[in-house]
Amino acid sequence: MNILNKFSILRIIILVLLIFIIFDITFNFSLSKKPKIFVFLDSSLSMADEKKFPLAIDFLKILKKEIKNLKIFTFGETIKEISSITNLSCQEKRTNFKKILDISFLKKPDIVLILSDGLHNSGSFSLTEKLPFPIHSIGFGIPIIYDFSISDVIYPNFTFVNDTVKIIFRIKSTNLKGWLSAFLIIDEKIIQKKELNFLTENVILEDSFKLVFFDEGKKFLTLKISEIKEEIDYSNNQYFFTINVRRKLAKILYLSNQPTFNLKFIKRVLEENPNYQTDFIYTFGKENINLTIKDYEVIIFDNFDFNIVKNKERELIDNLIKKVKGILFLIDRNSNFTNFSEYLPIFLEKIQLEKEVYFCLTEKGREHIIFENLLKDINNLPPFAGYLKGKPKENTQILLITEKDSSPLFSYHFYQNKIIALFSGFPFWRWLFIGDELLQAKLNDFLLSLISFLKEGRYQFNFFLDKEIFNYGEEVKIKVIALNEIGKPAKNLNMVLEISKYEIKQVFNEIADGLYQTNFLSPDTGEISLKISIFKEKEKIKEEEIKLKILPELEEKKTPYLDSLFLKSLAQKSDGNFYLYPHVPTTFTFLEEKKKINLQIYFQNNLYIYLILISLYILDIYLRKKKGLP
């Protein structure tokens, strides 16, 4: 080829480049190469099951035959590159998937393949950014169940109209955590909703709904929890139950052998209220009484003289007293308790009578629920005409005292699971006979509250733990449900948990009316004794001892299960695939695809193209001058 031809070719190249630049032509083409594949074999103790590690080795043997460019690693707490897969065993005590990412970012493979059960249990692990390489995960073992389920619902079989009903429910988390909604449904209508936060997996959370029924009859309720997409089974996400609502009927017996005006007003209050069923016997001791022993819950003795009771009637009284929950004594000037000590331990001194006796509430009286609605009006109530000066029993709670000498006017104490109350100011009907209608209504409620108190008894406490056995370092949650003396949520109690051996002291928080909770970390392993002390103001009203079993932090152990959710999430977040062995494609096209390198050459506004063009033009001028050509 002569020099003129060479110059012609050079000018053609320059012309072509100019055309490409003018018309903005772009060249696109790609090159390909075989991908660099890293295979990570889980060799932790949990893989030692016969459904896992032997199958993973068999799969890896097939993979090595079909794909040549594999780099194989074993991993657990550490990572080790291996050249042979013979004589491998599960020696690693924990599993840390973060190690896979660390070495992959360092050595930059094109594809990562993980053979594992997905049971990550060493260190934290999270994928926040998209990875530059896909992760394909193959799971070995039996998939773990992921489920939120209603494990228990505690509710009364029956309740009364206008009473507060507490429905306690427990939701179990199986390998899931996060927020969950709980709904209480009546007649397909959601009436209440609660949001529960499962901070950790495999725990049981407890909560409750409170509601009031205003009409009687059988109520059909449903407790339902929201459905989470990761769950496998939704059948245990709802619980059906019924509560029978009826009108309250407290069985009361009124006894007097010297009736006073108290009878008239007590009878009016009780008979106007359909929640109470009362028998009035007010000629007791003066003639033969045909009294059937019913399941009375409260007895009211009004101005009763036990000296005139006949022997047969005493036996009847004794049988009645054994069955009841509460007894109220209304004392008048003729009341006589000389022979009463054979029934119950009550001691009264001689009568102090016929003078105006002004009263005041004690500190306990101001706190007590029976005076709750009367606190603002207590000074507007009339004084009494006299009182019986009694000897308070040990542990007697005095609620009402005389203004001058602080003698007890109204007190109660507990004896053999009964409440024994004495109202020794007389006449009691002075309080019940008041012209002010609003105040009269409050006094009626006071009498009904007093009877409810006699019927229901003392404080009740229920202690709950999330589970029976905890691991070391795991948070322990203790809840206490407290009911006051008449069975309503006990507010403003002080509860302290102590573990004296470790000098631990925790104060409970009142997270709802009558519901107290404290959380703490287990201080040691083994059996640990906790002491819970409960105070009302500064008075201790309950002490309870609870024992916990704390297990040491265990090493990984052989298990047939795998965490398919973890492995699937790992693959999805890196644009890879998840396969549950043996459901793996027979041809490994997802691993054999050659890596493509895409190249793009554009001419307009490309500095390098312009430099090439200028260089060729200068070369053309130089060659022509050198040869003496025009």
Image (spheres, helix red, strand yellow):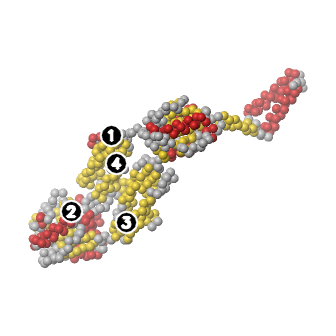
* Residue lying farthest to the bottom in this orientation: 287
Residue annotated with mark 3: 243
Instruction: Indicate the quadrant where residue 500 lies.
Output: top left
For the residue pair 463 and 292, the one nearer the viewer reads as 292
Q: Amino acid at mark 2?
A: Lys
Secondary structure category for the residue under label 3: strand
Front in this rendered view, residue 355 or 333: 333
Query: CA separation, marks 1 and 3?
Result: 44 Å
The C terminus: image quadrant: top right
Image position of 298 (left or right of 223): left
Question: Which of disc 1 and disc 4 is earlier in sequence?
Answer: 4
> Residue 363 appears at what percent x and percent y?
23, 59
CA distance separating discs 3 and 4: 30 Å
Judged by depth in the image, the label closer to the viewer, 4 or 1, is 4
Residue under label 1:
524
List the residue tagged with mark 2: 418
Task: State the residue at coordinates (31%, 55%).
Answer: 462
Image point 35% across, 41% down: which residue? 551
| Amino acid under disc 1 | Asp
Sequence order check, earlier mark of 3 and 4: 3
In the picture, the disc for residue 167 is: none
Of the image marks 2 and 3, the number of the one nearer the N terminus = 3
Q: Position of residue 296 (x, y in %)?
A: 23, 69
In this rendering, is residue 172 above or below 112? below
Q: Secondary structure at mark 4?
A: loop
Near-viewer residue (316 or 628)? 316
